[in-house]
């Protein structure tokens, strides 16, 4: 599932040790931009926590899974993010190397068409 929402609050970072080693979890509160806005608590785990993206006020595009589990005849639901992008930012865009561009030193226009290696 995917949602676009505004980050309104960061809850305290949680850390601990489990059978698989150390873990960390950051819960964030986002608000939808619907006619009747809703606040949603989303859990971000491990290396998905990126302080540059998780700033209150940022519009985030969040890909997440919803999971429920039972404990003592009560049900608990988690919204777990597996990908977060700042809305409008292009992470997959190639870096701009134009400032580092160095033109070729030899004059390619002087080569004739007969100089092809094939």
Image (cartoon, helix red, strand yellow):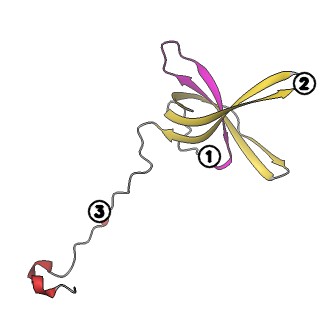
Magenta-colored span: 29-49
How far is the residue under mark 3 from the one under mark 1?
31 Å
- Residue most extreme to the top: 36
Mark 1 or mark 2: name the one nearer the start of the chain.
Answer: 1
Residue 99 disc label = 3
Residue 111 shows in this picture: no
Image coordinates of residue 20 in percent, x first then y, are 81, 53
Circle 1 or circle 2, nearest the eye: 2
Q: Is residue 108 left or right of residue 63?
A: left
Mark 3 or mark 1: name the one nearer the start of the chain.
Answer: 1
Q: Which residue is mark 2?
A: 72
Q: Residue at x 85, y 51 (%)?
A: 19
Quarter of the image where the N terminus is located: top right
Look at the numbered disc 3 and give the secondary structure of its residue: helix
Residue 70 shows in this picture: yes
Residue 48 disc label = 1
Mark 2 or mark 3: name the one nearer the start of the chain.
Answer: 2
């Amino acid at each position: 599932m995917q949602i676009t929402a505004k980050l309104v609050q960061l809850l305290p970072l949680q850390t601990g040790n489990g059978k698989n080693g150390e873990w960390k979890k950051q819960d964030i509160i986002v608000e939808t931009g619907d006619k009747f806005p809703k606040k949603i608590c989303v859990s971000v785990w491990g290396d998905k926590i990126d302080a540059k993206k998780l700033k209150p006020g940022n519009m985030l595009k969040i890909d997440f899974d919803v999971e429920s589990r039972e404990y003592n005849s009560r049900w608990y639901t988690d919204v777990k993010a597996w990908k977060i992008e700042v809305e409008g930012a292009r992470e997959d865009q190639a870096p701009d190397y134009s400032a580092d561009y160095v033109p070729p030193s030899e004059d390619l226009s002087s080569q004739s068409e007969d100089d092809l290696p094939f």
